[in-house]
Image: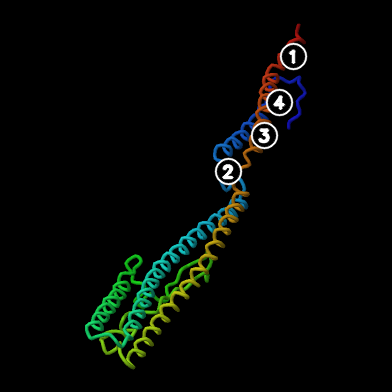
C-alpha cells in the first residue's frame, strides 16, 4: 500500500487506497454471493484447479457406477423372468410325474390310460409354450441360446459378470415327446419316471444357478450403492459450499464494505483540510 502523508492534494493516495480496498471487498463479496447462489464452492477451474480436477474425476466415477448399477438391475430382471419360467416348468413336470405315477394302477382301462396321456401331452405342450413365451426385450431366455451374455457391473475394466441360461429345455429334451399309453405301463413306466426325474433335475439345477447369480447381483447392487454414496460424498466435500460458513464470511465482508465506503468518503474530503492553511 502506498504511503499517504495527507498534505499532498494533487494525488489523493488515501482515497486511492480506500478505493482499492473497497474494490477487493466487492470482488470477494461477489465470489461468496455466487457460492451461496450456486451452492458450490468451486464454480470454475480457476477457483481451485486441483480440487476441480479431482471432483470431476469423482463425478465421472459416480456416473459410471450409477450406469453399472442399472446394468445389475437389468441382469436381475432378466434372471427373475427366467426364474419364473423355470418355476412354472418345474411345477408342470411335478404334475406330470404325479399323473405318471397315478397311471401305475393295474386296474385302469385303455380309456383311462388314453385320458392320462392326453392330459400329459397338453401339459408338455404348455411347457413348450412357456419356453417360447419367456422373453426379455424380445429375446428368448429358456431355449438354450441366451449364453455368455456379459454385463458390466462396475466402473473399471474387468468388472463384469457373464450370464448363461444354457438348459435349453423342451419336451424333446425330456425324452417325453410322443408319449403313449404303453409308456405308462409295465417296465416302460420306470423309464418314463426316470426321464421325468432327469427333466426335473435339469430344471432344478438351472433354478439353483439362477438363484446363486441373483444372490451375487444383490451383493453387487449393495456394494455399488455404497460406492456411489461415498464417491458423491467425497466430491461434495470438494465442490459444494459450506452455506453457513459462506454466510458468515459475506456478513463480515459486508460490514467491511460499509467501513471502506466511509473511509473512502473521508479520504475524498481530507484534502479540504489543507485549505485551513490559507486562512
Separation of disc 4 and disc 2 at Cα? 38 Å
N-terminal of the pair, mark 2 or mark 3, is: 2
Decide if residue 123 is on the left or right side of residue 43: left
Label 4 to label 1: alpha-carbon separation: 15 Å
Mark 3 — residue? 248
> Do callouts 4 and 2 mark residues in contact (Cβ within 8 Å)?
no
Earlier in the chain: of badge 3 and badge 4, it is 4
Q: Earlier in the sequence, mark 4 or mark 2?
A: 4
Q: Which residue is under mark 2?
A: 40
Q: CA distance from mark 3 to mark 4?
A: 32 Å
- Circles 2, 1 touching at the beta carbon (< 8 Å): no
Q: Quadrant of the C terminus?
A: top right
Q: Which mark is residue 274?
A: 1
Residue 141: x and y in percent read 36, 72
For marks 4 and 1 on the same chain, the one whose residue lies earlier in the sequence:
4
Precedes in sequence: disc 2 or disc 1: 2
Disc number placed over residue 13 in the picture, else none: 4
Amino acid at each position: 500500500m502506498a504511503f499517504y502523508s495527507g498534505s499532498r492534494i494533487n494525488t489523493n493516495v488515501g482515497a486511492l487506497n480506500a478505493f482499492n480496498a473497497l474494490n477487493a471487498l466487492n470482488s470477494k463479496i461477489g465470489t461468496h454471493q455466487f457460492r451461496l447462489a450456486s451452492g458450490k464452492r468451486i464454480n470454475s477451474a480457476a477457483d481451485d484447479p486441483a480440487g476441480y480436477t479431482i471432483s470431476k474425476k469423482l463425478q465421472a466415477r459416480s456416473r459410471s457406477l450409477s450406469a453399472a448399477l442399472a446394468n445389475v438391475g437389468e441382469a436381475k430382471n432378466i434372471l427373475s423372468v427366467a426364474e419364473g419360467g423355470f418355476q412354472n416348468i418345474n411345477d408342470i413336470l411335478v404334475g406330470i410325474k404325479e399323473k405318471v405315477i397315478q397311471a401305475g394302477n393295474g386296474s385302469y382301462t385303455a380309456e383311462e390310460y388314453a385320458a392320462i396321456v392326453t392330459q400329459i401331452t397338453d401339459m408338455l405342450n404348455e411347457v413348450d409354450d412357456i419356453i417360447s413365451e419367456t422373453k426379455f426385450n424380445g429375446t428368448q431366455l429358456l431355449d438354450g441360446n441366451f449364453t455368455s451374455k456379459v454385463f458390466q457391473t462396475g466402473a473399471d475394466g474387468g468388472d463384469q459378470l457373464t450370464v448363461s441360461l444354457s438348459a435349453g429345455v423342451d419336451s424333446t429334451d425330456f425324452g417325453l415327446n410322443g408319449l403313449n399309453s404303453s409308456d405308462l405301463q409295465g417296465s416302460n413306466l420306470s423309464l418314463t419316471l426316470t426321464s421325468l426325474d432327469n427333466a426335473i433335475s435339469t430344471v432344478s439345477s438351472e433354478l439353483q444357478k439362477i438363484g446363486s447369480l441373483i444372490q451375487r447381483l444383490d451383493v453387487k447392487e449393495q456394494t455399488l450403492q455404497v460406492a456411489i454414496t461415498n464417491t458423491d460424498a467425497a466430491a461434495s466435500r470438494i465442490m459444494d459450499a459450506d452455506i453457513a460458513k459462506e454466510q458468515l464470511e459475506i456478513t463480515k465482508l459486508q460490514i467491511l464494505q460499509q467501513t471502506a465506503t466511509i473511509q473512502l468518503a473521508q479520504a475524498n474530503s481530507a484534502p479540504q483540510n489543507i485549505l485551513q492553511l490559507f486562512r
